[in-house]
């Protein structure tokens, strides 16, 4: 499973890179604060949302601490998606939040 640190994600955003985030936390968690531009797909709904995802697009998976996003990353990776888990999750995030 591919992993990326919070610091590396922040550096890539600061360099103007367009990144695709999928936040697998529950809606209430996301409303409390999230990375700008994320797509929220709670982990329990991920399988149902597969038709909405592009296998040719890289995604960075996000959750509170990295556990649920790790599960989502492993699941999507097994299906051939280009996914990377953001280690440490929102607990480690120091960048902008909405």
Image: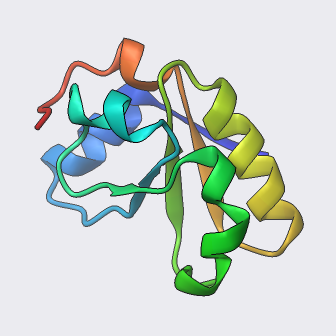
Residue in front for this viewpoint, 62 or 58 = 62
Please tell me which residue is depicted at 30% across the width and 55% down the height of the picture: 38
Please tell me which residue is depicted at 63% across the width and 58% down the height of the picture: 45
Residue in front for this viewpoint, 27 or 84 = 27
Position of the C terminus, as image quadrant, is: top left
Residue in front for this viewpoint, 12 or 62 = 62
Residue in front for this viewpoint, 44 or 88 = 44
In the rendered view, does 9 fall on the left or right side of 47? left
Please tell me which residue is depicted at 50% across the width and 52% down the height of the picture: 60
In the rendered view, does 37 fall on the left or right side of 88? left
Please tell me which residue is depicted at 28% across the width and 48% down the height of the picture: 12
What x and y, as percent, mark residue 90?
Answer: 38, 23
Circle count: 0
Quarter-of-image position of residue 3? top right
59 to 96, vertically: above or below: below
What x and y, as percent, mark residue 36?
Answer: 17, 48
What x and y, as percent, mark residue 53?
Answer: 56, 79
In the image, farthest residue toward the right: 78
What x and y, as percent, mark residue 89?
Answer: 47, 25
Q: According to the image, what is the colour scheme of the structure?
A: rainbow
């Amino acid at each position: 499973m591919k992993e990326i640190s919070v610091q590396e994600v922040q550096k890539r955003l600061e360099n103007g890179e367009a990144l695709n985030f999928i936040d697998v936390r529950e809606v209430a968690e996301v409303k409390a604060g999230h990375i700008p531009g994320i797509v929220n797909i709670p982990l329990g709904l991920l399988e149902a949302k597969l038709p909405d995802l592009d296998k040719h697009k890289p995604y960075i998976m996000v959750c509170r601490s990295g556990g649920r996003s790790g599960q989502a990353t492993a699941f999507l990776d097994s299906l051939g998606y280009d996914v990377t888990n953001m280690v440490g999750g929102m607990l480690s995030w120091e960048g902008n939040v909405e």
